[in-house]
Amino acid sequence: MFKKLLLVLVVIVTYQGWKQLSQEPEAGRVATHNEVIMYSLTTCGYCKAKAKELRSEHIAFKEYYIDTDTQRRDELNDKLQKAGYPPRGYGTPIMDIHGWMLPNNPSMDVIKEYMNKRGVSPGY
């Protein structure tokens, strides 16, 4: 039974990832700015690892902690909803790359792809 449940979970996660990557780029865009913003939780190990990755790639970014800053949490939920994602139905970290929302701890390859395609250069 556990294997079947695990298989169903893998299929759902894979579908959601494919659905996110197959979206039209403008569909996930909620703003126009030249920033890289990471929405994090103070207790999130994935967030700490992503911040370390971004720094090692010399990518300038702002980090907001949504578990301690309710204004930023509300801002994030608004952006996600405008981008077509369910509010409060996400995994952290969540990236806002030049106005495009990338929830659920996107890979560095996806982050760089959005930065390159959208004309955002890493900050040194």
Image (cartoon, helix red, strand yellow):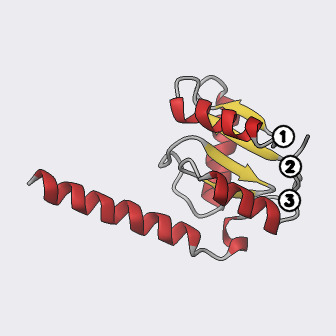
Residue 47 point in image, percent of width and height: 59, 34
Circle 2: is it few (<14), some (14-19), or many (20+) Cα within 10 Å?
some
Q: Nearer the viewer, residue 19 or 30?
A: 19
Q: Which mark is residue 74?
A: none
User: Can residue 35 be seen by looking at this rendering?
Assistant: yes
User: Can residue 30 be seen by looking at this rendering?
Assistant: no
Residue 100 point in image, percent of width and height: 72, 59
Instruction: Identify whether 114 is placed above or below 44.
Output: below
Give the mark, 2 or 1, whose residue is nearer the N terminus: 1
- Amino acid type, label 1: Ala
Residue at image point 32% right, 66% down: 11
Give the mark, 3 or 2, whose residue is nearer the N terminus: 3
Q: CA distance from mark 3 to mark 1?
A: 17 Å
Q: Nearer the viewer, residue 103 or 47?
A: 47
Q: CA distance from mark 2 to mark 1?
A: 6 Å
> Which image quadrant for residue 109?
bottom right
Residue 107 point in image, percent of width and height: 59, 53
Q: Are marks 2 and 1 in contact (CB under 8 Å)?
A: yes
Residue 70 point in image, percent of width and height: 64, 29
Q: CA distance from mark 3 to mark 2?
A: 17 Å
- The residue indicated by pointer 1 is 60
At numbered mark 3, what does the secondary structure look like: helix, strand or loop? loop
Circle 1: is it few (<14), some (14-19), or many (20+) Cα within 10 Å?
some
- The residue indicated by pointer 2 is 122
* Horizontal side, residue 16 vs residue 11: left or right: right
Circle 3: is it few (<14), some (14-19), or many (20+) Cα within 10 Å?
few
* Horizontal side, residue 86 vs residue 26: left or right: left
Q: Which mark is residue 32?
A: 3
- Amino acid type, label 3: Thr
